[in-house]
Image: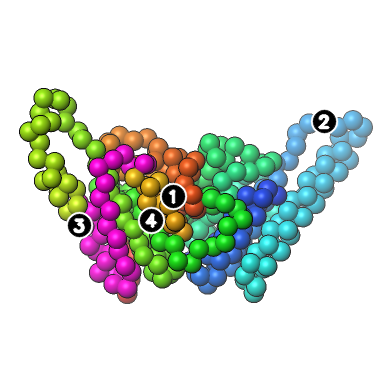
Amino acid sequence: MDIHIGSVVVGIDGSAHALAATRWAAVEACRRGLPLRLVSAVGWATWSPIGLPALGEEYERGVLLETARAMVDAAADAATATVPGVEVQREVRGGVPARALVEESAAAALLVVGNRGSGGFTGLLLGSVGVTVAAHAHCPVVVVRGDAARPVRPDGPVVVGVGEEAEAEAAIAFAFDEAARRGVPLVAVHSWIETVVDPYLVPYVDWESVALEERRVLTDALAPWTGKYPGVEVREVVVRDGAARALLSAAAGADLVVVGSRGYGAARGLLLGSVSQAMLQHAPCPVAVVRSRTVDAAALLEQP
């Protein structure tokens, strides 16, 4: 699977956060040499109007379409103002926003949404659209967080959470690719916490040896990718702390944080999105959620 194909798709709902996502995505589309696709989903209303139902429904449908087209046009203006010359595709379609975006993701290289929405995208922060899209999209999903007015930071590093799970490999592949494209360092964070059940054994545990083993886990996970991307400066961070707290600390000053969808680190059994949701709620910068089936890491390693 080539993660460079398709387009960069943005969910548009008329909110300031969607415009911030559009500006971010325009820069990303330019980096990838891909078109920017702006998508607004209009859910057709089912209420019964007074008078002739057909005429009432048609009028309402027309108003919704006109509003959606105006939102997409405003987003297109924001994109071209940010990146003059970027190729912009516009799409207004019917359907539930989350479902429409998941369908759009099938032909996309990247799906981008704002961290809060209005109208159809309301509730994104806590997951009504954002978590649904991150859980079901066919490509990596980026939620643009942070100050909507802040400029794009060309020198900020890419931060990635690294664990032993299969989900981490896809996130690592995506993070290395993004760091190489941006020409910035990659900060790889691996966290661990104590798993000793009997507190009486704690004084007898060689924590220094445990820390060395955890560092080896991180180095081994990165080894195939440091060979493929020799030009990327890699900074390894091993922290004796919770996964979310370690990532949030490393995210200060970052341009992008990359996480898998299942959680990582020594805390086993994390549910879908537990660490990802913490990033979506608190990260100071855009967050990429990368599921294993959205990036074929093995195929990417084989590419020259």
User: Which contiguous range is marked in magenta?
Assistant: 217-245
Residue closest to the eye, 45 or 271: 271
| Residue where numbered disc 3 is placed | 220
- Drawn side of residue 74 relative to residue 37, left or right: right
| Residue where numbered disc 2 is placed | 48
Marks 3/1: CA–CA distance:
22 Å
**Of pointers 4 and 3, the one earlier in the residue sequence:** 4
Q: Quadrant of the C terminus?
A: bottom left
- Discs 4/1, front: 4
Marks 2/4: CA–CA distance:
51 Å
Q: Is residue 222 above or below residue 16?
A: below
| Residue where numbered disc 4 is placed | 159
**Of pointers 3 and 2, the one earlier in the residue sequence:** 2
User: Residue 294: where, in percent of width, then height?
Assistant: 42, 54
**Of pointers 4 and 1, the one earlier in the residue sequence:** 4
Residue closest to the eye, 250 or 93: 250
Rendered image quadrant of residue 70: bottom right
Label 4 with label 3: CB-CB less than 8 Å: no
Crowd band around label 3 with a 10 angstrom C-alpha radius: few (<14), some (14–19), many (20+): few
Q: Residue at x 44, y 40 (%)?
A: 278
Marks 3/2: CA–CA distance:
62 Å
- Discs 4/3, front: 4
